[in-house]
Image (tube, rainbow, N blue to C red):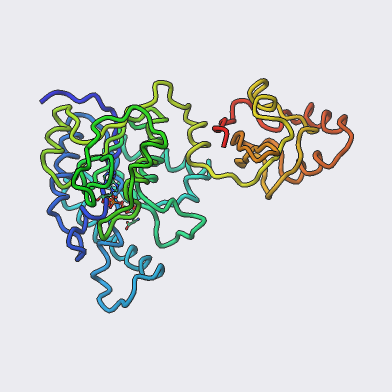
Amino acid sequence: MQKLNWRRIVLKVGSALIAPDQDGCRSRYLLTIAQFIVRCRSQGIEVILVSSGSVAAGAHLFPTAQERTVVMKKAMAAAGQTEMMAMWDRFFDFPSAQILLTHGDLRDRERYESIRETVFTLLDHGVLPIMNENDTVTTDDLKVGDNDNLSAMVAAAADADALMIFSDVDGLYDKNPNLHDDAVLLPEIKSIDDSIYAMAGCATSAVGTGGMKTKIEAAEKATSHGITTYIINGFKEQTFTKLLDGENPGTIFLPYEKPMQEAIHWMTHTASEQGEVVVAGSYDESLEGETGCIRGDEIVAVHGEFAVGDTILVRSNDGTRLAKATANYSSCLLNFIADNEQSEFSDKMQNSIGPVISEKDIALLEKS
Ligand SMILES: Nc1ncnc2c1ncn2[C@@H]1O[C@H](COP(=O)(O)OP(=O)(O)O)[C@@H](O)[C@H]1O
Ligand SMILES: N[C@@H](CCC(=O)OP(=O)(O)O)C(=O)O
């Protein structure tokens, strides 16, 4: 067998593979995935598993449930997660560890660093991290909402070389293959633009969450961090043989040639802004020329409440999203600077505190 040149990979397993009959966990497909994990580890490849399926796995424990309300799904997830972890654990003769998280954890830089450190420590000690969204505690504001995007955030946090999204189709087709007989499989995607998103339809399986759209979003997040991304069929054994032979069994999304630096990637794709600073200048005037230099007299308005170190959105007054950045000032102080007519005051502040946003903590956004 040829030696694969991945150092660390993230595998994302969809609900349909965990509970194909929607009647509790089944080992039918997981056994092959588990064998793949064992083979990768025996070649020295570090593996992180993102496993969906807690709701699908737990549903059978609530036979009298009339409807799948949000609260009912949370209860199913809480109960199903235990069954699912027990199932995974049975396959391995090495330890595994459960990490449940939300977007609230990933978008907070301190908690994000803590997740990274824990994952690296587990890997250093040969423990398999198994991750999922913490469905029981999520709210609309706190959740990632789908494990495709979550797995891409995890892959970026873990500095993985490859992200493999195992689904119930062979890869990305030019249209939904479950609805169109003439759909064509696309083996390689060099760059992701609107035409790629236009191919994605919704999930047609009973248990899937995001369909192809969230998988393309995940591929965009991961490839922009230099992570090769696969969408592949987890139901077929030959998928795993091909992967181990170094072949492409589905769709491969090629990584950016110039990947974003880790902190900028986190700010662009994982952090969400706590507030907004509206500036008078245009994109080029405010940010491209002297990156990070926003003068106090350029600030038109400050929206939301944020503290030093929070992520903010910089927007021009024509509505264009210019950048995401780490705030060096609180919203309270920036409001004061914006309201103060005398520019000497803001100059004095900036001379002592520094620029409103710093050059190293700024992610320029597309003009949108
Ligand atoms: N262009 C497309 N190519 C492939 N599958 C597509 C496409 N558009 C929509 N789909 C649907 O996406 C489904 C996979 O997504 P989903 O059901 O969320 O799976 P998972 O549980 O693996 O995340 C496929 O079964 C298919 O019905
Ligand atoms: N956190 C949820 C999974 C949500 C999800 O993204 O599901 P899927 O589309 O099957 O990957 C669960 O464990 O049921």
- Residue for point 20% across, 56% down: 87
Instruction: Between residue 304 and residue 192, name the one nearer to us.
Output: 192
Q: Within the image, what quadrant is residue 81 found in? A: bottom left
- Residue for point 36% across, 37% down: 196
Q: Is residue 141 left or right of residue 165?
A: right
Instruction: Between residue 346 and residue 323, name the one nearer to us.
Output: 323
Q: Is residue 136 left or right of residue 76?
A: right
Percent position of residue 17, x then y: 20, 52
Q: Is residue 67 visible?
A: yes
Q: Within the image, what quadrant is residue 10 found in? A: top left
Percent position of residue 341, x then y: 88, 37
Image: 144 above or below 118: below
For the C terminus, give its image quadrant. Answer: top right
Image: 32 above or below 58: above
Percent position of residue 271, x then y: 52, 42
Percent position of residue 40, x then y: 19, 34
For the N terminus, give its image quadrant. Answer: top left
- Residue for point 38% across, 51% down: 146
- Residue for point 82% across, 28% down: 347
